Amino acid sequence: MALKESETMCLSIQDLNRMKQEFLEAYQKLLGDAYNRLRRALTLKLKAMKICAEREDNMSNKTSEDGSIDLP
């Protein structure tokens, strides 16, 4: 998402392979940063899924067999 007009660029697989051969440090930083962003995003998604599952379990535990909700 951009706040103002911007350009996007992409690299082909051949460009990435050439970058790896000619500019290894930049290649490793590029992919390392992307890996870290992906890892953080997936970690957050897993935490959210766990929270949703726990809430669902709590709600099902409060519901009796006839479908009514047991209040404390």
Image (cartoon, rainbow, N blue to C red):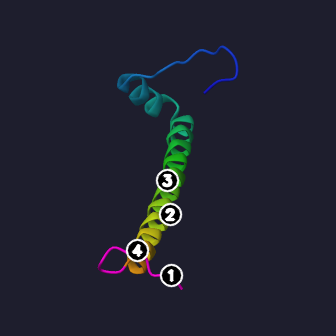
Confirm whether the magenta stretch covers residue 68.
Answer: yes
The image shows residue 13 at horizontal and vertical percentages of: 36, 26
Q: Which of marks 3 and 2 is nearer the N terminus?
A: 3
Magenta span dominant secondary structure? loop
- Give the residue displayed 45% in from the left and 81% down from the top: 70
Q: Is mark 1 on a helix, strand or loop?
A: loop
Q: Which of 44 and 64 is in front in this view?
A: 64
As measured in the structure, the alpha-carbon distance from the residue carrying label 3 to the one carrying label 2 is 12 Å
**In the rendered image, which residue does mark 4 sit on?**
57
Q: How crowded is mark 4: few (under 14 residues within 10 Å), some or many (20 or more)?
A: few
Q: Within 10 Å of the Cα at label 1, are there few (<14), some (14-19), or many (20+) other Cα atoms?
A: few
Q: Mark 1 points at which residue?
A: 71
Q: Residue at 43% across / 73% down in the picture? A: 59
Q: Distance between the residues labelled 3 and 1?
A: 40 Å
Comes first in the chain, label 3 or label 4: 3
Residue corresponding to mark 2? 47
Kind of residue at disc 4: Asp
- The answer to whether residue 60 is magenta is no
Residue nearest the observer in this picture, 65 or 3: 65
Q: Which mark is in front, 3 or 1?
A: 1
Q: Quadrant of residue 14?
A: top left
Q: Nearer the viewer, mark 3 or mark 2?
A: 2
* Residue contact between numbered discs 3 and 1, judged by CB atoms under 8 Å: no
- Quadrant showing the N terminus: top right
The residue mark sitting in front, 3 or 4, is 4
What amino acid is labelled 1 in the image? Leu
- Label 2: few (<14), some (14–19) or many (≥20) C-alpha neighbours in 10 Å: few
Residue at the disc numbered 3: 39
Q: Give the range drawn in magenta.
A: 64-72
